[in-house]
């Protein structure tokens, strides 16, 4: 036992931390946070053009927000958009135009205009004699042609899209297995579209042509009533564009935009940093 060497445990004070790299990571994070805070404060105190330019650059560095366009062509490019609150006025304007037609007094009971959630609906309803189309045919009569020409010239000035519907009553069209009320309602709507596009509507203004046959009767309790046979024009509302949250051309602000000096932060007592001495 006397020959055994004693075990000596030597405690070393924490000097190694001073030479390690962990403090550099923490210090870098601190400096980055302070820099970000300084930039935010500088932008908040800068002039409005500088705020918009710098903020817009970082949100949209490629300047895509300024790329705007329209698929509309012709007269509709300069015409004001008819909004929901303006549809009632448009209804009156179109009514005044149709009143100039020679046979309007005979037709007015067959024309109905209603402002709906979809837009201004113009229904051209048949009578038993076939005012707008001959029974069983898709060729518009001269009366229908004159009426559609007047409407197309005025509607063609608008940027609003248009849909056209064809409807029939519930009478069987014929004994044919290949042509019936579905085909007839669609053909009449298409005939109205062709005529209106040739006399005033822009080629891209008609966005829908619908044939309903007898599936959307105007008088469901009288399915064979002549007024169920009709062509409906709908001047639709223009969908509002999503407002751009920022505007940028992809370039950094110029020196002129940056000439407004930011408001300096309030001066306070300077903080003193003392070097911590390692414990011994």
Image (spheres, rainbow, N blue to C red):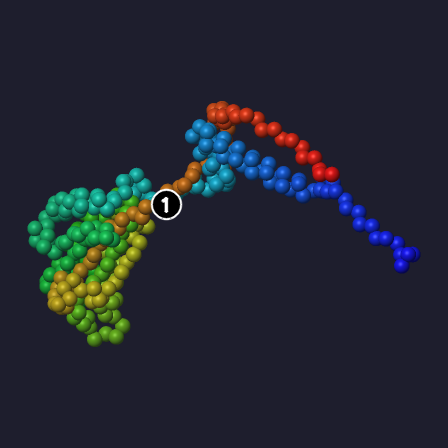
Q: Quadrant of residue 123?
A: bottom left
User: Looking at the figure, which quarter contains the N terminus?
Assistant: bottom right
Q: For this view, does 106 lie left or right of residue 119?
A: left
User: Looking at the figure, which quarter contains the C terminus?
Assistant: top right
Q: Nearer the viewer, residue 251 or 172?
A: 251
Residue at 47% x, 25% y: name it.
263
Place of residue 224 in the rendered image (x, y in percent of width and height, measured from the top left): 13, 68
Q: Residue furthest left?
A: 105
Place of residue 254 in the rendered image (x, y in percent of width and height, measured from the top left): 50, 28
| Helix, strand or loop at mark 1 | loop
Q: Quadrant of residue 187?
A: bottom left
Query: Can you see residue 88?
Result: yes
Total numbered labels placed on residues in the image: 1
Residue at 50% x, 27% y: name it.
265
Q: Nearer the viewer, residue 147 or 270?
A: 270
Q: For this view, does 42 lie left or right of residue 84?
A: right
Query: Can you see residue 94?
Result: no
Place of residue 62 in the rendered image (x, y in percent of width and height, measured from the top left): 50, 41
Q: Nearer the viewer, residue 249 or 5?
A: 5
Residue ID for mark 1: 242
Q: Residue furthest right?
A: 3
Place of residue 109 in the rendered image (x, y in percent of width and height, measured from the top left): 9, 55
Residue at 70% x, 35% y: name it.
277
Residue at 74% x, 40% y: name it.
15
Q: For this view, does 241 lie left or right of residue 174?
A: right
| Badge 1: residue crowd in 10 Å (few <14, some 14–19, many ≥20) | few
Is 43 placed above or below 3 here?
A: above
Q: Residue furthest front?
A: 2
Is 100 placed above or below 268 here?
A: below
Q: Nearer the viewer, residue 275 or 164?
A: 275
């Amino acid at each position: 036992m006397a020959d055994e060497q004693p075990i000596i445990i030597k405690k070393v004070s924490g000097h190694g931390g001073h030479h390690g790299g962990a403090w550099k990571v923490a210090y870098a994070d601190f400096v980055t946070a302070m820099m970000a805070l300084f930039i935010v404060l500088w932008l908040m105190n800068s002039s409005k053009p500088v705020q918009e330019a710098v903020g817009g650059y970082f949100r949209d560095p490629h300047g895509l927000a300024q790329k705007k366009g329209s698929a509309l062509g012709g007269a509709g490019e300069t015409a004001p958009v008819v909004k929901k609150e303006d549809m009632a006025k448009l209804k009156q304007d179109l009514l005044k135009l149709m009143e100039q037609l020679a046979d309007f007094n005979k037709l007015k009971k067959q024309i109905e205009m209603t402002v709906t959630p979809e837009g201004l609906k113009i229904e051209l309803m048949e009578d038993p004699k076939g005012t707008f189309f001959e029974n069983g045919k898709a060729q518009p009569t001269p009366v229908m042609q004159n009426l559609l020409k007047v409407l197309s010239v005025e509607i063609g000035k608008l940027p609003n899209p248009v849909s056209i519907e064809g409807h029939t009553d519930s009478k069987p069209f014929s004994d044919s297995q290949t042509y019936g009320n579905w085909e007839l309602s669609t053909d009449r709507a298409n005939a109205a579209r062709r005529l209106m596009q040739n006399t005033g509507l822009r080629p891209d203004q008609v966005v829908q042509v619908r044939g309903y046959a007898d599936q959307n009767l105007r008088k469901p309790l009288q399915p064979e009533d002549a007024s169920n046979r009709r062509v409906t024009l709908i001047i639709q509302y223009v969908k509002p564009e999503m407002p751009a949250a920022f505007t940028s051309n992809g370039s950094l602000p110029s020196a002129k935009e940056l000439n407004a000096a930011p408001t300096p932060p309030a001066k306070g007592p300077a903080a003193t940093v003392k070097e911590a001495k390692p414990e011994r």
